[in-house]
Image: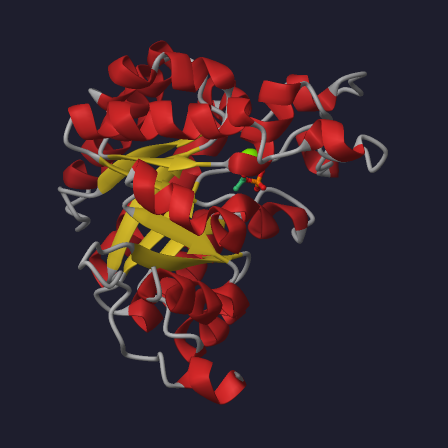
């Protein structure tokens, strides 16, 4: 079986009837790129940038971040690398952020909410991302979006950072894609308006399941109540994908559900453009898609 999977390297991710899906991988640190390339992923659909913050004693500098993003971009060559901006919060504690204790951290001050209220931290990351963008094919992805205004505010800050870099004659990719994670019910409900603002959607099914079904993703006792196969979650995925396509942008999944082979047929039918999964799930998923 393993040998059969190895033979899928270099083969297109395409169904028997010719429907193509981009098959990407998720990573948490630059060293994971080895596994991405070894499993022949066609890109990186989610680079969780949190490790830079979680493993530092203080706010990671622009240079430190730049080196990490550049390394991944260079190793991936012209394959797309979607880097998600800071997604920490009271559940992923980072001492130097001095976040207050919260009773409901999943509903609290986290991710884009920190970035928009503390733009001086956000700008360091955006500068590093933009500078690294000339070394490969980087896209920026914003997590935990619930409104159009948040996207506009984030894009305004990105525009300011671009202007600063232009003023300093620092090169960056002027056409860098900016996308958002679809992982809150509000973002699905507002998907048409959001699609008009961005270049792509990537559905975070871990959080989307949590927030749609009101089931804490950290709570192991919820069993069948936390079922990501719930028709409510699947309908959310369909709504987001259809809204994306109405606005001619692409839509993928980067949550764990993307690798669930029981749902591969459903995702193909919904018309998802991209699935981003852990590196070891890439070839089994390519096999399932090619047999569809
Ligand atoms: C998700 O919520 O599905 C996701 C991909 O992001 P994370 O698991 O990092 O919250
Ligand atoms: Mg998430």
Using the image as rendered, state which of residue 261 and residue 104 is in the foreground: 261
Residue 179, image quadrant: top left
Q: Is residue 214 visible?
A: yes
When the figure is inspected, residue 220 is found, relative to residue 172, above or below; the finding is above
On the image, the x and y values in percent for residue 221 come to 86, 33
On the image, the x and y values in percent for residue 25 come to 43, 59
When the figure is inspected, residue 236 is found, relative to residue 258, above or below; the finding is above
The residue under the point 44% across, 79% down is: 38
When the figure is inspected, residue 196 is found, relative to residue 136, above or below; the finding is above
Q: Is residue 87 visible?
A: no
On the image, the x and y values in percent for residue 233 come to 52, 27
The residue under the point 42% across, 18% down is: 187
Ligand 2 quarter of the rendering: top right
What quarter of the picture does the C terminus occupy?
bottom left
Residue extending farthest right:
221
Using the image as rendered, state which of residue 189 and residue 70 is in the foreground: 189
Residue 283, image quadrant: bottom left
When the figure is inspected, residue 44 is found, relative to residue 165, above or below; the finding is below
The residue under the point 28% across, 32% down is: 161
């Amino acid at each position: 079986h393993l040998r059969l999977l190895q033979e899928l390297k270099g083969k297109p991710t395409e169904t028997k009837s010719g429907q193509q899906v981009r098959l990407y991988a998720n990573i948490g640190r630059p060293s994971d790129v080895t596994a991405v390339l070894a499993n022949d992923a066609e890109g990186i659909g989610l680079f969780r940038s949190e490790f830079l913050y979680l493993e530092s004693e203080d706010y990671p500098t622009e240079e430190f971040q730049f080196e990490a993003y550049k390394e991944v971009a260079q190793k991936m060559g012209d394959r797309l690398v979607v880097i998600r901006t800071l997604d920490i919060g009271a559940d992923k504690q980072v001492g130097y952020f001095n976040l207050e204790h919260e009773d409901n951290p999943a509903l609290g001050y986290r991710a884009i909410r920190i970035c928009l209220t503390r733009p001086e931290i956000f700008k360091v990351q955006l500068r590093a991302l933009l500078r690294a963008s000339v070394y490969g094919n980087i896209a920026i992805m914003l997590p935990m979006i619930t409104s159009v205004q948040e996207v506009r505010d984030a894009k305004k800050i990105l525009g300011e950072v671009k202007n600063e870099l232009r003023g300093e004659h620092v090169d960056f990719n002027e056409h860098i894609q900016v996308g958002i994670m679809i992982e809150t019910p509000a973002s699905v409900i507002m998907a048409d308006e959001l699609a008009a603002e961005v270049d792509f959607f990537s559905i975070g099914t871990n959080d989307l399941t949590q927030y749609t079904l009101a089931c804490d993703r950290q709570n192991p006792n919820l069993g069948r109540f936390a079922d990501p196969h719930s028709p409510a979650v699947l309908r959310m995925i369909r709504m987001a994908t259809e809204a994306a396509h109405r606005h001619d942008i692409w839509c993928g999944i980067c949550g764990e559900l993307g690798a669930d082979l029981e749902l591969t047929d459903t995702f193909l039918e919904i018309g998802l453009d991209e699935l981003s999964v852990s590196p070891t799930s890439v070839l089994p998923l390519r096999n399932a898609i090619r047999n569809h």
